[in-house]
Amino acid sequence: LKLAVLISGGGSNLKALIEAAMNPEYPAEIVCVGSDTDAAGLAHAAAAGVPSFVVRPSDYASRAEWGAALAAAIRDFEVDLVVSAGLMRILPAEFVSEFSPALINTHPALLPLFPGAHAVRDALAAGATETGVTVHIIDEGVDTGPVLRQAAVSIRAGEPEAELHERIKAEERPLLVDTVRAIAEGSLNLAAVAAAHQ
Ligand code: GRF
């Protein structure tokens, strides 16, 4: 399975996928796409010899044009799956309709709870005792697509956001690696999940 991993930040999820793919048993070949030139995660790709390229929103006049450039770059790699892992940008509708359902995202909350860009902070602010992580198909909404996998993480009272997010990521990384493996092996059929979700 050839996959493009979209990142904007530190890329620890990307790193987990790269490390998994180092095992010849793990059926994935990765390219990395950064949305920002200073995305630290690009260093993980470079260190592993994983092809990476950057398509910066600030280089384009509109989200739609950025999306079109992103789609063109990914299309050139002829990937089977696009994985958004810490992409802090909303993908335009044209991009989603081109790649979904072979377009998944990982989100640091138990969707539909706490959608959006501040899921960890929102769970803490809500006084929740539990949150978690969701891997889902990206559909035309924001954090609304069919759920593929979830894992729960307890919240410790008064826990700092960064600490909770790290504990969520500890669950998130293996969950994402396992979800991609299931897709690659065919035991998880994205088209079937998307069709059932209509
Ligand atoms: C992940 O927790 C992801 O769910 C969220 O942003 C975080 C990115 O972490 N959208 P990293 O860049 O993979 O370390």
Image (tube, rainbow, N blue to C red):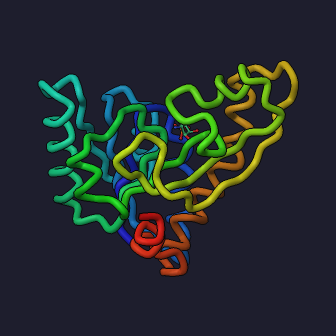
Image quadrant assignment for residue 159: top right
x and y, in percent, of residue 20 in the image: 56, 62
Ligand 1 placement by image quarter: top right
x and y, in percent, of residue 111 in the image: 60, 45
The residue at 37%/26% (across/down) is 38
The residue at 41%/64% (across/down) is 198
- In the figure, is residue 44 to the left or right of 176? left
The residue at 24%/49% (across/down) is 95
Q: Nearer the viewer, residue 41 or 78?
A: 78
- In the figure, is residue 51 to the left or right of 64? right
x and y, in percent, of residue 68 in the image: 15, 44
Image vertical order of residue 128 relative to residue 139, above or below:
above
Q: Nearer the viewer, residue 120 or 48?
A: 120
The residue at 26%/40% (across/down) is 92
Q: Nearer the viewer, residue 80 or 123?
A: 123
In the displayed orientation, state which residue is furthest to the front: 198
